[in-house]
Every structure is written in C-alpha cells, then in structure tokens.
Amino acid sequence: MEPVSTFSPADPTRALTLREREAIIAVLERGTNIRKLPITTADRSRWLSQVSHTLAGRSCECGICPSVELTDAQGHTPATANGRVVLQAEAPGAVLHLFIDEDRLSHLELAPLAGDSITVFPASTDITTDLSTW
Ligand SMILES: [Zn+2]
C-alpha cells in the first residue's frame, strides 16, 4: 500500500451523483427537523442555494449504506456545530438524514432499516415525510 501523500490534507471530492443531488433536494424541500423546531422557507431556500456548489467527500465505509460527507467547492466540510440542524425524511426501508452545520450542508446519511443493504440513494419520488408523526 502506498503511503498517503502528506501534501493532500483533504479527502478527494467529486461531483454529486444524480441520486445524491435529488436526495439532498428532496430532504431540503420536504424533510422535518428532528428537533421539532420550525424550519422557515428562507432556511430551506438558503440551503437549497448551496446544492449547486456542493461536492461529495468521504463515503461511509460500513458497506451497507450510501452515506456521504458533503463539502463546499474547496473541499471543506463544516465542523459539527452546536446549532446543528438535522432534517429527516423516509424512503422504502430506510431513513434519510441531512446534517447542516454552521448553516452549511455537511452530511447526507441513509440508514437502512432492519440491517438491509441499500447502497444507492432512493429516487426523489420515493422520498417521503410523514408530517402527521411530527
Ligand atoms: Zn454506512
């Protein structure tokens, strides 16, 4: 195994896949705040405006989920902040979480239910929120 270059401090980034981008947008548009605080239309539009220059960073290594860190155009992921916002949505067999730290998109997580392996984000049309439970 080649040693990792000491001159590459950041993990490599890549463009979001279509499914990642669709999932982020669906959760931003329809997701519910897990802390039950209100999310305003202005919050949603401000975060949606970041999507076009958001890149994918390090992927989860668990092997059964497609979760991925999100970075800005410079490859920086915001640090986990006290005011972190977590938006949640559901898809068949999975729960999606979008983390927002320092008012910036930081992590897109899909947690498969029942230990299933789901390695690709669901299509936007399969992403739902059951507002009645919140
Ligand atoms: Zn994982």
Image: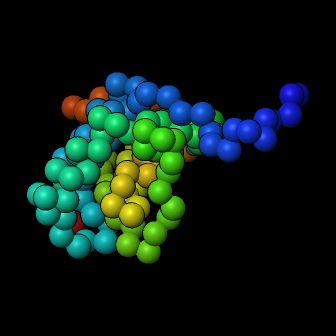
* 41 to the left or right of 105: left
Q: Is residue 20 above or below residue 18?
A: below
Between residue 131 and residue 97, name the one nearer to us.
Answer: 97
- Residue 54 in sight from this viewpoint: yes
Q: Position of residue 85 (x, y in %)?
A: 34, 64
Q: Where is residue 15 in the image (x, y as percent from the top left)?
A: 43, 27
Q: Position of residue 77 (x, y in %)?
A: 50, 51
Quarter of image, ligand 1: top right
At horizontal 51% and vertical 41% (from top left) the residue drawn is 75
Residue farthest along the front direction in this orientation: 7
Between residue 102 and residue 62, name the one nearer to us.
Answer: 102
- Residue 118 in sight from this viewpoint: no
Q: In this view, does 134 lie above or below 74?
A: below
Quadrant the N terminus occupies: top right
At horizontal 14% and vertical 63% (from top left) the residue drawn is 40
How is the model colour-coded? rainbow
Quadrant the C terminus occupies: bottom left
Q: In which quarter of the image is residue 72?
A: top left
Residue farthest along the top direction in this orientation: 18
At horizontal 25% and vertical 40% (from top left) the residue drawn is 25
Q: How many labels does the image show?
A: 0
Q: Where is residue 57 in the image (x, y as percent from the top left)?
A: 53, 39
Between residue 45 and residue 92, name the one nearer to us.
Answer: 45
* 91 to the left or right of 76: left
At horizontal 27% and vertical 64% (from top left) the residue drawn is 33
